[in-house]
Amino acid sequence: MRSVRHLLAALLPLALCALLAGCGNRANLQVGLNDADANEIVTLLSRYGIEAQKAPAKEGVTLTVNADDIARATTAMQAAGLPRRALSDLGQTFKKDSMISTPLEERARYIHALSAELESTLQQFDNVIAARVHVVLPERIAPGEPIQPSSAAVFVKYHGEVDEDTLLPRIRQLVASSIPGLSGEGGRAKVSVVMASSAYTAPVVEWSNVGPFRVQAGSAMALSMTLLGLALLMAVMLVGLLFALCRYHPGLAAWLKDHFGKAPAFSADAVARDQGD
């Protein structure tokens, strides 16, 4: 019994160290997020088998993941365009910070607000990850020079399968109808659209339940066999413990004898009796 106590005393600190190491092996993935962006990232990472945890803070929500998953999580977020770039609306862009604004400031704010509104609208299309719109409004470069016509350049990044032949005309129609001077067929011809597919093609992880555990489907069989092996090992250890107690603990052998009529065959009393016979 003393050797067992010494063994437990030696293993307990090691178990505590392993537990503390497992609890502290997390790293910050993103800080200062709003709830909507944080929830979107958690949902995305769960599809790839990455567990992300939210922690509210004064400056926003902090997302943490296992340190070993930082690289995969960052790659998945970049491919999905998350967290989304903060877009200002017309009200924020044209908020008055001074009494008088120059025509150049007004024009710059208007172009920025128009581009941001179009980018936000384009991101509502299915499978679109990110969109950028560069707007050129009619402008006279110098007195007497002809007015430069309106034009627009659009970049769209998407994932999955997208029918570009159907999506491209819709994007051109939407952008041309939103920018002054681009109405009609001639205006749509001045809208250039570039589409790019995301290069990240990691498969979505399928999950399976094994008892109280939720694991990847490919690991379900291995976990089942591991749990079965642990159960058999524990059963063998319990039988061995019972054997040792009955063998070297006279009080337990006497208790079993009182309740069951005889001591176990492997107890010390039974062995001594058989040797005396």
Image: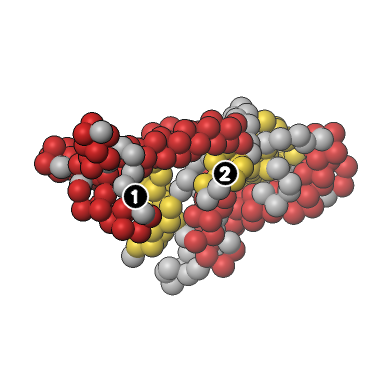
The percent coordinates of residue 87 (x first, y second) are 55, 55
Horizontal side of 13 relative to 81 (left or right) equals left
**Residue 221 visible in rendering:** yes
Q: Which sits in the foreground, 233 or 177?
A: 233
Eyeballing the image, is 173 above or below 217?
below
Q: Dot 2 lies on which element?
A: strand
Residue 85 locus on image (x, y percent): 52, 49
Toward the viewer: 242 or 69? Answer: 242
Q: Mark 1 points at which residue?
A: 262
* Residue 254 location (% of width, % of height): 25, 53
The image shows residue 62 at horizontal and vertical percentages of 39, 54
Q: What residue type is labelled 2?
A: Val
Residue 154 placement: quadrant: top right
Q: Which of marks 1 and 2 is in front?
A: 1
Residue that mark 2 sits on = 210
Residue 138 versus residue 194 in the image, above or below: below
The quarter of the picture where the N terminus appears is top left
